[in-house]
Image (spheres, coloured by chain):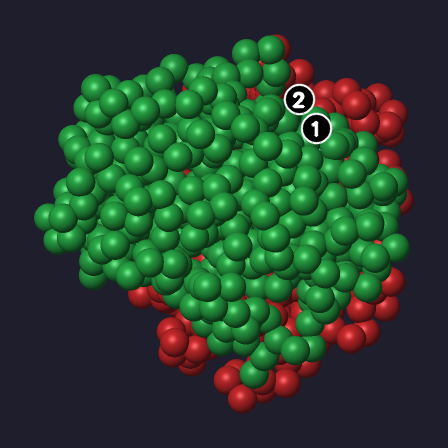
Chain colours: A green, B red
Amino acid sequence: MLSTGASSRCDAMRRVAIVGVGMSKFGEEWTRGFRDMIIEAGVRAVEDANLHGEEIDAMYIGTMAPGSLVGQEHVGALVADFLGLTPIPSIRVEAACASGGVALRTGYLAVASGMHDCVVVGGVEKMTDTPGNEVASALGGAGDQEWELFFGATFPAIYALMARRHMHQYGTTEEQMAAVAVKNHANAAKNKYAHFQNEITIETVMKSKYIASPLKLFDCSPITDGAAAVILMPLEKAKHYCEQPIEIVASAQASDMLALHSRESMVELKATKIAAKKAYEQAKLQPKDIDVVEVHDCFTIAEIMAIEDLGFFPKGQGGKASEEGRTALNAEISVNSSGGLKGCGHPVGATGVKQAVEIVWQLRGKAEGRQVKDCEIGMTHNVGGSGATAVVHIMKKV
Amino acid sequence: MLSTGASSRCDAMRRVAIVGVGMSKFGEEWTRGFRDMIIEAGVRAVEDANLHGEEIDAMYIGTMAPGSLVGQEHVGALVADFLGLTPIPSIRVEAACASGGVALRTGYLAVASGMHDCVVVGGVEKMTDTPGNEVASALGGAGDQEWELFFGATFPAIYALMARRHMHQYGTTEEQMAAVAVKNHANAAKNKYAHFQNEITIETVMKSKYIASPLKLFDCSPITDGAAAVILMPLEKAKHYCEQPIEIVASAQASDMLALHSRESMVELKATKIAAKKAYEQAKLQPKDIDVVEVHDCFTIAEIMAIEDLGFFPKGQGGKASEEGRTALNAEISVNSSGGLKGCGHPVGATGVKQAVEIVWQLRGKAEGRQVKDCEIGMTHNVGGSGATAVVHIMKKV
């Protein structure tokens, strides 16, 4: 047997590296459409990799809800067409807000297995052309439509339930959650691609209006337009294209019950824990080895749970650790140097790929004003819905 | 290099077999929802394979527009949850009406590459819970939203343009197109899973009203609910589970321009021709070796173009061949023994997987009243949109 359950890597597989990255400016991009953004990100990644288009074998595009948001499905073919890459096989993959991470893993496996030698992985979402209530409905499709959304449980409400339980069980406070938003805005202010480039204070968060108590406006990631892309190759080949290939040393994905009420716990994401365990095993690494991590902070409470579930802090201590600054840039572990979903923005299908772009920039030492010092190993953590899909990647300087 | 362009198979890859198949009754299934149908198909496939759920490593679900049609995205996790298969990685793939075929190819590659040893591939669409105009909009997302659908070019209109050009260039007639519908209804009448189980005459088609001239109501496949599933394993392992494993001897996919007006020709699908060429090369077979084929007859003209593009008849002769009965059950080549999209129905994401189910039944000799005699080799052909994605599989008795 070469594989079991959520793990898929075997010794027979090839080592895989990222040789090119690119992204569009995240934000409310009124002048650019869905296809403009993914083409921009794709072209930047291809240029960054010093590639010619004809060297590309296949493409995987992560996007969550383009049908509902911009009336466009069949996005794999669309991107192949507009990037001039036909007739390569091009596939859209979807796992709600984890679509980008799942696309990355699908592309990784395509190269690791020997199927393809040069793969583009893209992620994209165009969200601001759609009225707010329709965006909320589209995003609600990431949870259980029949048992959650139909009864009014939008995503802020679902994460608010988790936050309440975390507060009850571990004494986590609203100020601790606010500290996550303050830190992520501080990082985003140093990232020219970020949606928000302004710092905020604890008071900004605490005085903002409740969206779903205890979550306030500044506890929530924004509605964002954006795209990101990476190019993957076997490591051996990568060295001929790129001065600083970044190796993907682990790629793991797990699923969990779709609806929050079906889960064993409301204060942890089991899929994150399983995917992280597999990833650490694949990479033969431990949480203490990770220098920089992009976690899925769709809400501030999500970052607090993530840094616990990924093993950086004991369960229940994530809020306190955030408040004490232990997750700030160049502190104990640098969490969401890009600004995260909160500060950099959250074009849902793009997020998982953008996380990889940020980690590559960090490991190359090219993260400008937000560079993490002596950065050797990075991680990305991308979540679908309220946790029914989680994808974890670990990346390393070669 | 292990791969180039649209081809992906290499000698180092493992041989892959289908060990279990299942589908739900296709039709206007008012009493069953999206999740009911895919669970029914999945359970039937698992039972058919004599498997236990815990032996399954991963899942790939093809579905086109569940966000627009039933408000549900994140379908990979949904199906893993409701089939009791968490925490396995479960991924939705989408390529419009080729979503099922692309899911099959993604699952095939996952097993062939050694990543996974037991994979479920499902396809599903629930279409009748949605008003007709919204279904037409959702399906329009398979083409170019900005350059086709926005200006009113729905799919019947796009295929009508191809039909007009085919008539102009090759003398194809409306009666020849009608013959495709008559043959597919005759086959569907022998299939208990089919949407339509009634025979029709040339007169039925010719007297039906125009949808987009020259295409009439009976030239168009219907709006259908349904799901299908297959279980894949390495061939060596398959022999222990299954008396009659069916080997997938070729799997190829190609992309083309999304919009019809961007293409070189309006009377052929280039993506079909490229995917078919790759598939024949992989399998070391020729068109004359194929005994039974399920082609993508979303409109009657599509079947006529498909049997030409797949190499069964010279370009321009598909209409005449259909009229002469050369594609009927047990004629020169048995085309769409299931009834095809026209007769069996077209739940878009399910279609590509249903085609594989039908071919497996034929190769096992279990196709009941519609059995093709001395059936050794079968093919499936699944198209996305108006041809921007095409997927071709060839299957063989072991």
Q: Is residue B58 left or right of residue A375?
A: left
Residue A220 percent across, percent down from the top left? 32, 30
- The subunit carrying tag 1 is A
Q: Residue at x 49, y 29 (%)?
A: A188
Q: Residue at x 68, y 31 (%)?
A: A41
Residue at the disc numbered 2: A36
Q: Residue at x 17, y 33 (%)?
A: A214
> Would you call the spot at circle 2 few (<14 residues within 10 Å), some (14-19), or many (20 or more)?
some
Circle number at residue A11: none
Q: Is residue B379 left or right of residue B67?
A: right
Residue A358 percent across, percent down from the top left? 59, 41
Is residue A250 in view? yes
- The subunit carrying tag 2 is A
Above or below residue A149? Residue A17 is: below
In terms of image quadrants, where is residue B211?
Answer: top right
Residue A192 percent across, percent down from the top left? 59, 25
Circle number at residue A39: 1
Most foreground residue, B358 or A383? A383
Look at label 1 and name its amino acid.
Ile
| C-alpha gap between disc 2 and disc 1 | 5 Å
Residue A363 percent across, percent down from the top left? 65, 49
Look at label 2 and name its amino acid.
Asp
- Secondary structure at numbered mark 1: helix
User: Is there a contact, CB below 8 Å, between mark 2 and mark 1?
Assistant: yes
Q: Residue at x 42, y 71 (%)?
A: B46
> Would you call the spot at circle 1 few (<14 residues within 10 Å), some (14-19), or many (20 or more)?
many
